[in-house]
């Protein structure tokens, strides 16, 4: 995007163009806009003449917009002075004005004067250490340097009569300035100590702006035929261009293309784009449309338009702490969650997303991580006589700021109360603001704030509305302890109360803080259990919502299905009375809406509504006994791997991370057992629809505290101490073939006379298999073959490492081995190696009757 | 999963005196029948292999992919398991 600021024309003074020069949006500051800059978040800062654009926010000379041109906030700095230049770093915004220079916080919330001048400040720049360089016209000096503590370091008066209008900084820290003067040497360079390094006279008359990119100094001004000049870092002229009009400002894109804001004359354009190779400039856009006359000065900057209107954040809990995705590639602790006693990960814990917040149910710890709301704190007058209800709109009449109330901590009117809500205006709330509205009963709400609004994320107790103290029952009561939670039909569903393990509790629809079950309306809260009349219900082990249509209650030895809404026409019935569901994470859905879960006899598949089928009853009939699973010592987690089209089933010993896992391939309906290092024992699985494509993966929460995924490029498993992308634990992989009956009946022996193994790869390009270890076994019975294949200490009749890749002289075996049955085992257990199977051909002959 | 061009050799019933092509056990592990009646394209024992290999993503069999860290940060800051994962979507 190219942003342009200039003289107000047609009720607009800021324009945003795409790279093709097509106008995307425009904005009215109410007067002349002089400078525009963007920050790393693509916010747009505009400085200019103090003006009121009639939006109700009063007069301002500094504005902050988002990248779509929507107003965020604005202020007027240094009285009514016009803003001539802006500079940014990660912490502050710096402005040069007709009265001097000032520094503000990035939110424009706090202003500090750097210097007040008798004349104007025309240019400002800040280096990487926070040193500030201010240029301008002042009887005392033309150039000032202040450190980050706003202590003046030196001043310079390079010319007796000169107005420094352009200031920018080279990569070595030297500052380059440009003069508005009649002298020829209009561009000077100082080192950080204020010693002059060089000057340049190419722009021989007047310079209005300096822009440095990749250590090339671009100079804009009104020197005849040389309104644009390029200079290298040592002061040597590279080239100049006759734009035909005065250049007021230069913005350089990240790929090094300068754009020029110029003094438009009749028949010309106001914005030009420089071709640095051809050393020419071409018209880019015209801000005046059909307007005639001169546009005056304008200024431009570059950024990218961000269309995204939402953000996703990954959440993970370990070691009694909640961590969240603070940036695309970074997980950070939510500090408040790490306070002792907030979470206890040694106890069962469920968490789910609802209403743009994270709800955590952890025995007696009910918590919310809030990423959407702002926090307001009332003054000592508390919430007032009429507390706001959930969803009420409150407005500050003075500033126009509005907030939709989500949760309040108390109903008291004699102490500070915290209000969490979604602010729906760009204007923020400040201390002493009076916010007002009407509650659900049309009572007038009036609250006075005791502090500026605070930005999240927030961490607070999940209670009923206004009940942070835990003693108010206006909105019902949550169970004192629970271990399960989910969102269904807009209701928060809680279960797993140790005192009532068969019960479940649902909040009011669209109000997760209302648990009044005695209300009669169809959206009100409700509680219940799953049982035939007169019986005590089964223990609820997991909650499985299916869209807003069904809620599956997994129980210890049964499964129940709620169809529809429990308050309005819903039905609750048995889904299965022959199996339950192991635990809170022992289920998943595939992309055909099939439910998979771990039940009494292993892994089941079900349609909802429908019937349950045990998938393992034929292939792995003893899986429950073989895995020796115990509720108190094991965790079973399941997830659908949408990239690999299969179901991941992980059985992990809680105390040690020892694990046994299965990948159920949906293409062949086959089970593929897997084992992982104990450090990577899976305790949680999650399919993350990340914003960044590189993070859209099935993510595994591991025993050592790291989030992992399956990386096709990694040939060994990543150890705790390994860096990202490095694996040092070999993958002990193998597959067996057999038992193969070598004679035409089991009464006859046969001979295995040869074997050819073709491994993956070998062609030009692509990836190649590493060598494959091959072991051959023979025996008189089939079961003996299996015993030999699976023995902890195997004794093959013959073994050989087959050379890979593809087919070569080294990948065949010529040896006669006699027996009734044969078995083959292929595998590899070497760090940094993997293998692929292409073809296995075995030669055999009938030998004779077994004697 | 029948494979085109296979000589119809299956575990348990070989053709006499010929080359036998043994396909990868694409239906995975199977322990539910008599050892001498191991079903076609199954195996009595395997570990850390999948049907789709990591070298060419072909349905031919091979070692499973390696486990790798997605983030360099250790959740919780210590050697403790990650007990739950979730995501939250927020309208900006």
Image (tube, coloured by chain):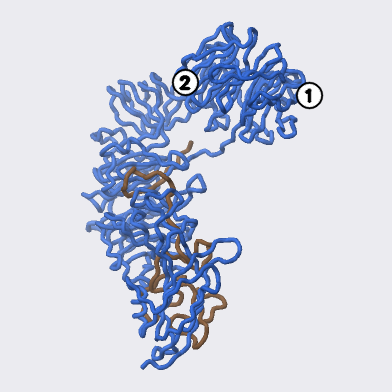
Chain colours: A blue, B brown
Looking at the rendered image, the disc whose residue lies closer to the viewer, 1 or 2, is 2
Please tell me which residue lies in front, A661 or A688. Answer: A661
Question: What residue is drawn where x is 27% and y is 64%?
Answer: A628
Marks 1 and 2 close (CB-CB < 8 Å)? no
Q: Position of residue A717 (x, y in %)?
A: 41, 56
Instruction: Classify A7 as above or below A656.
Output: above
Instruction: Classify A820 as above or below A82.
Output: below
Picture quadrant of residue A198: top right
From the viewer's perspective, tell me whether residue A763 is left or right of residue A717: right
From the viewer's perspective, tell me whether residue A162 is left or right of residue A242: left
Please tell me which residue lies in front, A652 or A127. Answer: A127
Chain ID for label 2? A
Please tell me which residue lies in front, A772 or A295. Answer: A772
From the viewer's perspective, tell me whether residue B68 is left or right of residue A1: left
Q: Which residue is mark 2?
A: A148
Instruction: Classify A530 as above or below A340.
Output: below
Looking at the rendered structure, which numbered label has been put on residue A73?
none
Q: CA distance from mark 1 to mark 2?
A: 46 Å
Chain ID for label 1? A
Mark 1 vs mark 2: tell me if same chain: yes
Question: What residue is drawn where x is 55% and y is 23%?
Answer: A87
From the viewer's perspective, tell me whether residue A358 is left or right of residue B7: left
Please tell me how crowded label 1 is: few (under 14), some (14-19), or many (20+) other residues with Cα within 10 Å.
few
Question: What residue is drawn where x is 59% and y is 6%?
Answer: A139
Q: Position of residue A413 (x, y in %)?
A: 29, 23
Total numbered labels placed on residues in the image: 2
Residue A314, visible in the rendered structure: yes
Marked residue nearer the N-terminal end (1 or 2):
2
Q: Secondary structure at mark 1?
A: loop
Q: Secondary structure at mark 2?
A: loop
Looking at the rendered structure, which numbered label has been put on residue A267?
1
């Amino acid at each position: 995007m190219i942003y342009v600021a200039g003289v107000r024309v047609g009720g607009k003074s800021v324009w945003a163009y795409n790279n093709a020069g097509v106008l995307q949006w425009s904005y009215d500051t109410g007067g002349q806009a002089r400078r525009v800059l963007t920050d790393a978040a693509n916010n747009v800062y505009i400085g200019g003449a103090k003006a009121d654009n009639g939006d109700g926010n009063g007069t301002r000379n500094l504005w902050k917009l988002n990248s779509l041109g929507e107003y965020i906030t604005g202020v007027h700095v240094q009285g009514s002075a016009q803003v001539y230049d802006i500079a940014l770093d990660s912490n502050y915004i710096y402005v040069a004005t007709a009265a001097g220079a000032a520094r503000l916080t990035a939110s424009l919330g706090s202003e500090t004067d750097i210097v007040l001048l008798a004349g104007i400040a025309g240019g400002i720049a800040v280096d990487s250490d926070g040193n500030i360089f201010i240029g301008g016209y002042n009887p005392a000096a033309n150039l000032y340097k202040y450190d980050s503590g706003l202590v003046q370091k030196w001043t310079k008066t390079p010319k007796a009569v000169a107005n420094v209008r352009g200031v920018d900084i080279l990569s070595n820290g030297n500052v380059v300035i440009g003069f508005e003067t009649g002298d020829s040497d209009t561009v000077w360079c100082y080192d950080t100590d204020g010693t002059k390094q060089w000057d340049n006279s190419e722009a021989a008359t007047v310079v209005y702006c300096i822009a440095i990119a990749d250590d090339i100094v671009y100079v804009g001004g009104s020197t005849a035929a040389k309104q644009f000049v390029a200079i290298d870092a040592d002061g040597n002229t590279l080239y100049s261009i006759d734009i035909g009009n005065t250049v007021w400002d230069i913005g350089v894109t990240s790929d090094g293309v300068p754009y020029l804001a110029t003094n438009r004359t009749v028949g010309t354009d106001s914005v030009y784009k420089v071709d640095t190779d051809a050393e020419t400039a071409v018209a880019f856009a015209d801000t005046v449309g059909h307007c005639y006359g001169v546009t005056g000065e304008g200024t431009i900057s570059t950024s990218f338009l961000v269309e995204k209107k939402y953000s996703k954040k990954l959440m993970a809990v370990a070691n009694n702490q909640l961590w969240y995705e603070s940036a695309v590639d970074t997980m950070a602790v939510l500090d408040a969650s790490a306070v002792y006693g907030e979470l206890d990960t040694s106890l069962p814990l469920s968490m789910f997303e609802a209403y743009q917040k994270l709800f955590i149910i952890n025995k007696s710890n009910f918590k919310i991580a809030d990423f959407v709301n702002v926090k307001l704190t009332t003054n000592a007058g508390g919430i007032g006589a009429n507390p706001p209800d959930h969803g009420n709109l409150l407005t500050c009449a003075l500033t126009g700021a509005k907030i939709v109330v989500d949760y309040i901590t108390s109903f008291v009117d004699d102490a500070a109360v915290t209000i969490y809500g979604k602010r729906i205006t760009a204007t923020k709330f400040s201390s002493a603001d009076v916010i007002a509205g009407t509650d659900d009963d049309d009572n007038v709400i009036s609250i006075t704030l005791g502090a500026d609004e605070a930005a999240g994320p927030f961490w607070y107790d999940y209670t009923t509305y206004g009940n942070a103290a835990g003693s108010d029952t206006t909105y019902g009561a949550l169970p004192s302890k629970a271990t399960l939670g989910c969102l269904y039909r807009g209701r928060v569903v809680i279960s797993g109360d140790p005192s009532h393990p068969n019960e479940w509790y649902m909040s009011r629809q669209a109000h997760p803080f209302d648990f009044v079950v005695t209300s009669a309306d169809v959206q009100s809260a409700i509680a219940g259990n799953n049982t035939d009349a007169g019986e005590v219900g089964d223990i609820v082990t997991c909650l499985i919502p299916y869209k807003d249509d069904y809620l599956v209650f997994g129980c210890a030895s049964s499964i129940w299905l709620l169809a529809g809404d429990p308050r309005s026409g819903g039905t609750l019935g048995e889904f299965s009375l022959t199996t339950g569901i192991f635990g809170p994470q022992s289920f998943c859905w595939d992309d055909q809406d099939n439910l998979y879960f771990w039940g009494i006899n292993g892994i089941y598949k079900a349609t909802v509504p429908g019937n349950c089928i045990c998938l393992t009853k034929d292939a792995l009939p003893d899986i429950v006994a073989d895995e020796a699973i115990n509720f108190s010592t094991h965790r079973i987690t399941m997830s659908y791997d949408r990239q690999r089209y299969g179901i991941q089933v992980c059985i992990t010993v809680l105390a040690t991370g020892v694990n046994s896992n299965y990948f159920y391939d949906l293409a062949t309906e086959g089970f593929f057992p897997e084992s992982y290092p104990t450090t990577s024992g899976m305790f949680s699985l999650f399919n993350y629809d990340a914003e960044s494509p590189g993070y859209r993966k099935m993510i595994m929460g591991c025993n050592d505290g790291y989030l992992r995924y399956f990386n096709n490029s990694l040939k060994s498993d990543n150890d705790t101490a390994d860096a990202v992308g490095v694996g040092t634990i070999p993958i002990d992989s193998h597959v067996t073939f057999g038992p193969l009956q070598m004679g035409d009946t089991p009464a006859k022996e046969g001979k295995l006379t040869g074997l050819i193994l073709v491994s993956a790869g070998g062609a030009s390009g692509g990836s190649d298999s590493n060598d494959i270890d091959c072991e051959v076994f023979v025996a008189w019975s089939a079961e003996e073959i299996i015993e030999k294949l699976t023995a902890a200490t195997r004794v093959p009749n013959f073994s050989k490492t087959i050379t890979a890749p593809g087919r070569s002289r080294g990948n065949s075996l010529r040896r006669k081995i006699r027996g009734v049955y044969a078995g083959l085992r292929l595998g590899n257990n070497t760090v940094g190696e993997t293998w692929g199977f292409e073809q296995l051909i075995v030669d055999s002959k009938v030998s004779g009757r077994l004697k | 999963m029948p494979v085109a061009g296979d000589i119809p050799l299956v575990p348990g019933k070989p053709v006499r005196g010929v080359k036998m092509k043994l396909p990868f056990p694409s239906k995975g592990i199977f322990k539910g029948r008599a050892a001498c009646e191991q079903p076609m394209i199954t195996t009595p024992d395997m570990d850390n292999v999948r049907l789709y290999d990591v070298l060419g993503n072909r349905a031919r069999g091979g070692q499973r992919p390696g486990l790798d860290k997605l983030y360099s940060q250790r959740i919780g800051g210590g050697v403790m398991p990650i007990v739950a994962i979730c995501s939250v979507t927020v309208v900006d």
